[in-house]
Image (spheres, grey):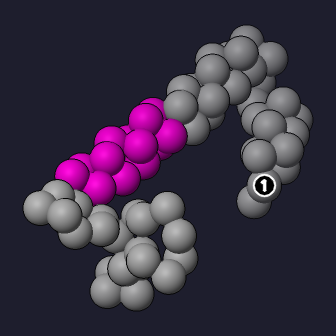
Amino acid sequence: FTMVGLQEFFYDHVPTEIRSLGLSLYLSTLGVGSILSSFIISAVEKATGGDGRDSWFANTLNKGHLDIF
């Protein structure tokens, strides 16, 4: 599913009385997922970097270590 597809699903298949509730829960889930993803990336950045080492999420692909993941 794409974002547009899920929005269309909620708009078409959810009763009109709770349509706005369904859309708000859907968009809230996307927001929480984005915040959680940012938190995980920050935690991995802090855990794998430091002491003069490059973290897994270095600025260049040659220095990054996402292959270890």
Disc 1: which residue? 2
Quadrant where the C terminus sits is bottom left
Q: Residue at x 19, y 64 (%)?
A: 52
Residue 5 coordinates in the image, percent (x, y): 84, 49
Residue type, numbered disc 1? Thr
55 or 38, nearer to the observer? 55
List the single residue furthest toward the front.
52
29 part of magenta stretch: no
37 part of magenta stretch: yes
Quadrant where the N terminus sits is bottom right
Q: Is 4 above or below relative to 32?
A: below
Residues rendered magenta in the picture: 32-47
Residue 63 appears in view: yes
Tally the numbered discs: 1
Q: Quadrant of residue 50?
A: bottom left
39 or 63, nearer to the observer? 63
Q: Is 65 above or below relative to 42?
A: below
Left or right: residue 27 compared with residue 10: left
Q: Residues within 10 Å of mark 1 (few under 14, many from 20)?
A: few
Residue 60 coordinates in the image, percent (x, y): 53, 70
Residue 22 coordinates in the image, percent (x, y): 65, 26
Q: Residue at x 12, y 61 (%)?
A: 51
